Image (cartoon, rainbow, N blue to C red):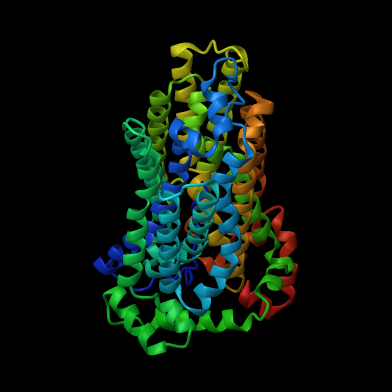
Amino acid sequence: MAGGGFGTGTGGGDFEAKITPLVIISCILASSGGLMFGYDVGISGGVTSMPEFLREFFPTVYKKNSQPGLESNYCKYDNQGLQLFTSSLYLAALVATFVASYTTKLLGRKLTMLMAGIFFLVGTAFNAAAVNLAMLIIGRILLGCGVGFANQAVPLFLSEVAPTRIRGSLNILFQLMCTIGILVANMINYGTSKMSGANGWRISLGLAVIPALLLTVGSLIVTDTPNSLIARGKMEEGKAILKKIRGVDNVEPEFLEIVEASRAAKEVKHPFRNLLKRRNRPQLVIAICMQIFQQLTGINAIMFYAPVLFKTLGFKSDASLYSSAITGAVNVLSTVVSIYFVDRAGRRMLLLEAGVQMFLSQIVITVVLGIKLKDDVNNLGHGLGILVLVFVCSFVASFAWSWGPLGWLIPSEIFSLDARSAGQSVAVFFNMLFTFIIAQAFLSMLCHMQFAIFLFFAIWVFVMTLFTLFLIPETKGIPIEEMTERVWKKHWFWKRYMDEVEDNPKAQANA
């Protein structure tokens, strides 16, 4: 889902390295940025279905839901302000991403993660103490700045600290933390919705302080990455840290490669202009399309609004939060599946299998809702309600072992070093842009398209599966610096973009 990010490994060579406790602890602490992001995604959907929250901030929606005669199965939550509460976070993240790409470069990964933690803490305080809509939106914007900074710095940190052989799995750790954050948020919403009094939503929003503190304290404890230190000219400190995290004394080959990579990256004066060169076009097209397609699966629509969605489908308030907790658990378990299979079955196999499963799940949901759930009549019944839940889970599971983590992992493997940092910013930008568009439009689309909204997403799943089949190459087990020779020059379609690399030896060194 939205929460990934991707890192800049130094290359494909596997250097001498132990998996040290320092690496494991650093990665767990840094990944709490993913936990925070997941919590924000999960909590907003639950809170927006709580009557007390709606009564206080969105009285028109509350009225539409509680007064007899005004009920509408598909339009009961159609309100631009309510959608802005959710989507403002992604709009802020979109802008913050570009600021964060400079702070990660100039100030390092550690300081950028600390800034993200501080944004999260202040944003949480605004949300939990909110007395009007403006405070709520300011809080969400500050949380969005935190997301932008964390999404830029944390995955970079993870991939630079991790030994090469477990880099893929540790990259997915960020995504796993996102899914755990969503599940925890769903469970907390379930608990706070049962509380007497009108402050359950404040507790839901306020408990975000825990992952925010974890990230803030974690970023104070961890050391910056060797790559970051060396890129900023701190050679000796970088080498000392490298010895510490690798647990071996012989780090010379890796140290020299990081120094060389840093030198090559500094030679690129205009990284975004460099990204538009013909030889970088296949990678750029795939990275952008994967971000757009990741959102057009409909996953965030389901995850943000799961409680609202299940309530719309006729589940009562408790049952709807309960159902979204089930989908949250499926999300976590399926992400673990992808950690196991990503380096065994390969990227394409996971994407193609999931494409078929997601498509069929959404077609079944469309048919059941089309026949049984009209705007003013709900004939869904208990059995068919459970059937919809099962197919929503089937959809979430297949997404979580495919487009969720791989939408980030594949772009991280395909860019050449000189284009990777700019490539990351562009990918995060497109991800947040389309997350914002879907979050802002989903409830209105649900109101106007009704059950056909699932058909809309199913058609996009069909398109992205064809895109995978013909245009996404397999990158499993191929070192980053060998991608041009072993992947792009041999691909039936993309090889035509590699002419420039053939003609220009200097370009070949960079590609």
Q: Place residue 487 in its image quadrant.
A: bottom right
- Determine whether, in the image, residue 238 is placed left or right of residue 302: left
Q: Residue at x 37, y 40 (%)?
A: 183
Against 132, residue 7 (above or below) is below
Quadrant in which the C terminus is drawn: bottom right
- Determine whether, in the image, residue 8 is placed left or right of residue 205: right
Q: Residue 75, image x and y in percent?
A: 62, 26
Q: Residue 359, image x and y in percent?
A: 59, 30
Q: Residue at x 54, y 41 (%)?
A: 300
Q: Residue 232, image x and y in percent?
A: 48, 84
Q: Residue 57, image x and y in percent?
A: 52, 40
Q: Residue at x 45, y 38 (%)?
A: 47
Q: Place residue 141 in its image quadrant.
A: bottom right
Closer to us: 479 or 128:
128
Closer to us: 319 or 165:
319
Against 286, residue 186 (above or below) is above
Q: Place residue 32 in its image quadrant.
A: bottom left
Query: Outermost residue toward the left?
Result: 21
Closer to us: 166 or 292:
292
Against 118, residue 299 (above or below) is above
